[in-house]
């Protein structure tokens, strides 16, 4: 019997072929942490698949495949290398499930296992996906991290993603954390002429964070 290879494992992971993934890792457990030239492991690839994207997918949301990878030792918080200017952002399996897979059942499964939701908020904001953002916020992520100098609440205000901006305000994200140009979320909301109600909520939250609320 031919020994499993990285190539065959990655193909099985992308096809959500849980049985083949489990069999390969039982024979060669070291493949759970093997990476491609871009630094992605089989877990990242499995999480990046979008449900329904191919008739060859062997399960609806990849839950069994991802479970097989994690149970075999694939790190839940494994990071794909990124440029330094990404700042606090980390490309973890959960981020791939949010940003690439847009796969809510898989996101829920990863969060249940304890995945850090902090790095995936920008992806939910980008699509103004209030359902996804709500699931991430329920996991109590860190809200003050910055990617390219921008916190998720600043990013939401700059891109005029009003649903997720409202959610981040309700979650208590700090609007006073400035970007590299020394603008905060209130400044950018005013510059983008966002609805008055949202600007007022941002101003009130900023006062509260600064001890003047």
Image: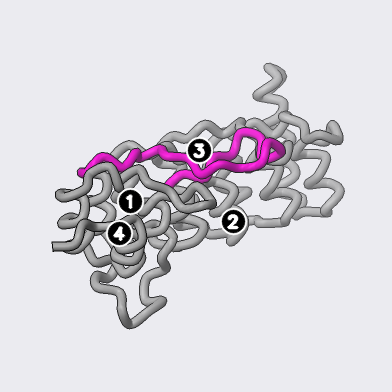
Which of discs 4 and 1 lies nearer the camera? The answer is 4
Sequence order check, earlier mark of 4 and 1: 4
104 drawn magenta: no
Secondary element at image label 2: helix
Circle 4 crowding by C-alpha within 10 Å: few under 14, some 14–19, many from 20: many
- Which of the two marks, 3 or 4, is nearer to us in this view? 4
The quarter holding residue 206 reads: top right
Q: CA distance from mark 2 to mark 4?
A: 39 Å
Q: Where does residue 88 sit, x and y in percent of width and height? A: 61, 33
Q: Which residue is mark 3?
A: 118
Residue at image position (31%, 42%) is: 74
The answer for how far apart the CA atoms under marks 3 and 1 are is 14 Å
User: Residue 11, located in which quarter of the rendered image?
Assistant: bottom left
Q: Nearer the viewer, residue 2 or 117?
A: 2
Secondary structure type for disc 3: helix
Q: Which residue is mark 4?
A: 9
Whether tag 3 and tag 4 are in contact, CB under 8 A, the answer is: no
Magenta highlight range: 72-93
Q: Position of residue 98 (x, y in %)?
A: 46, 55
Image quarter where the C terminus lies is top right
Reading the image, the residue beneath label 2 is 163
Image x and y of residue 119, in percent: 52, 41
Whether residue 179 sits left or right of residue 105 in the image: it is: right
Q: Which residue is mark 1?
A: 108
Residue projecting furthest to the bottom: 55
Which of disc 4 and disc 3 is earlier in sequence? 4
Residue 111 seen in the figure: no
Real-space CA distance between mark 3 and mark 2, rounded to the nearest whole angstrom: 18 Å
Report which quarter residue 20 is drawn in: bottom left
Magenta span has 88?
Answer: yes
């Amino acid at each position: 019997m031919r020994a499993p290879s990285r190539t065959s494992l990655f193909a099985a992971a992308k096809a959500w072929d849980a049985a083949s993934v489990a069999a390969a890792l039982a024979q060669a457990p070291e493949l759970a942490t093997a990476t491609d030239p871009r630094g992605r492991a089989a877990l990242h690839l499995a999480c990046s698949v979008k449900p329904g994207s191919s008739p060859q997918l062997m399960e609806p949301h990849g839950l069994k495949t991802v479970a097989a990878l994690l149970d075999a030792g694939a790190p839940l918080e494994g990071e794909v290398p990124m440029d330094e200017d990404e700042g606090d952002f980390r490309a973890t399996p959960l981020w791939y499930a949010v940003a690439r897979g847009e796969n809510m059942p898989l996101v829920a499964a990863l969060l249940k296992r304890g995945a850090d939701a902090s790095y995936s908020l920008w992806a939910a904001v980008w699509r103004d996906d209030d359902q996804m953002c709500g699931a991430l916020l329920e996991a109590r992520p860190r809200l003050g991290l910055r990617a390219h100098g921008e916190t998720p609440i600043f990013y939401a205000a700059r891109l005029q993603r009003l649903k997720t901006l409202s959610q981040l305000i309700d979650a208590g994200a700090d609007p006073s954390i400035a970007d590299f140009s020394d603008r905060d979320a209130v400044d950018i909301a005013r510059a983008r002429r966002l609805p008055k109600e949202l600007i007022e909520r941002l101003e009130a939250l900023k006062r509260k964070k600064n001890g003047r609320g």
